[in-house]
Image: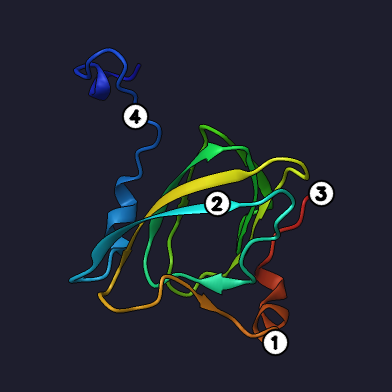
């Protein structure tokens, strides 16, 4: 346990600390906690953006996660995730398991009355292909 978290009581664990992420929270934002449940093999939402940053935690199964500028990766139950929101495209958030449900709980920060996500047209990911990172 790191020194800055030594004061925590037994059973309390800091999963992720991202102090620089707070700078991306829009002024006047509201916090929304959302549970995303994906049936076996579900591809999740098409490429989209979020209006502000979000922090998430996989509570069940495995999520195939791809965010613009990062290589695709598998998040497993217990893993935390951060998205900066704004202009960044979230390419994948699929259930990586063909035979079991997966689930992610996120808290997002967004201006009131904005949609939780906005699907991008097919042409935009194609134009921004140079920003995708593929596995070697």
Which one is closest to the eye, mark 2 or mark 3?
Answer: 2
Tell me whether the residue at label 4 lies in contact with that at label 2, contact meaning CB atoms closer than 8 angstroms. Answer: no
Q: Is residue 7 left or right of residue 92?
A: left
SS at mark 4 in the image? loop
- Mark 1 vs 2: CB contact within 8 A: no
Q: Residue at x 72, y 46 (%)?
A: 96
In x, y percent, where is residue 130? 70, 72
User: Which of the two residues, 44 or 128, is positioned nearer the viewer here?
Assistant: 44
In the displayed structure, would residue 27 be above or below residue 19? below
In this rendering, the answer to whether 23 lies above or below 61 is below
* Residue 122 lies in quadrant: bottom right
Q: Where, by quadrant of the figure, is residue 74 drawn?
A: top right
Q: Nearer the viewer, mark 4 or mark 2?
A: 2
Marks 3 and 4 sit apart, C-alpha to C-alpha, by 32 Å
Q: x%, y% of residue 135?
A: 77, 50
Residue 75 appears left or right of 85: right
Lower position in the chain sequence, tag 4 or tag 1 = 4
Q: Is residue 40 above or below residue 90?
A: above
- Label 4 neighbour load within 10 Å: few <14, some 14-19, many 20+: few
Q: Which residue is mark 2?
A: 37
Q: CA distance from mark 2 to mark 3?
A: 30 Å
Q: Which residue is mark 1?
A: 123
Instruction: Return the x and y of residue 65 as percentages of the image width and height.
Output: 63, 52
Q: Mark 1 or 3, which is nearer the eye?
A: 1
Under circle 3, the secondary element is: loop
Dot placed on the residue nearer the N-terminal end, 3 or 4: 4
Residue closer to the observer: 36 or 85:
36
The residue carrying mark 4 is 14
Query: Which residue matches tag 3?
Result: 136
């Amino acid at each position: 346990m790191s020194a800055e978290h030594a004061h925590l009581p037994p059973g309390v664990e800091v999963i992720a600390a991202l102090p620089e992420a707070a700078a991306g929270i829009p002024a006047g934002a509201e916090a929304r906690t959302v549970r995303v449940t994906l049936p076996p093999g579900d591809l999740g939402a098409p490429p989209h953006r979020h209006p502000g940053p979000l922090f998430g935690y996989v509570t069940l199964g495995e999520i195939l996660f791809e965010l613009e500028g990062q290589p695709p990766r598998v998040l497993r139950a217990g893993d935390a995730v951060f998205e900066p929101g704004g202009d960044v495209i979230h390419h994948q958030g699929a259930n990586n398991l063909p035979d079991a449900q997966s689930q992610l709980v996120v808290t997002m920060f967004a201006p009131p009355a904005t949609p939780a996500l906005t699907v991008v047209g097919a042409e935009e990911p194609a134009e921004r292909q140079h920003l995708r990172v593929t596995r070697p």
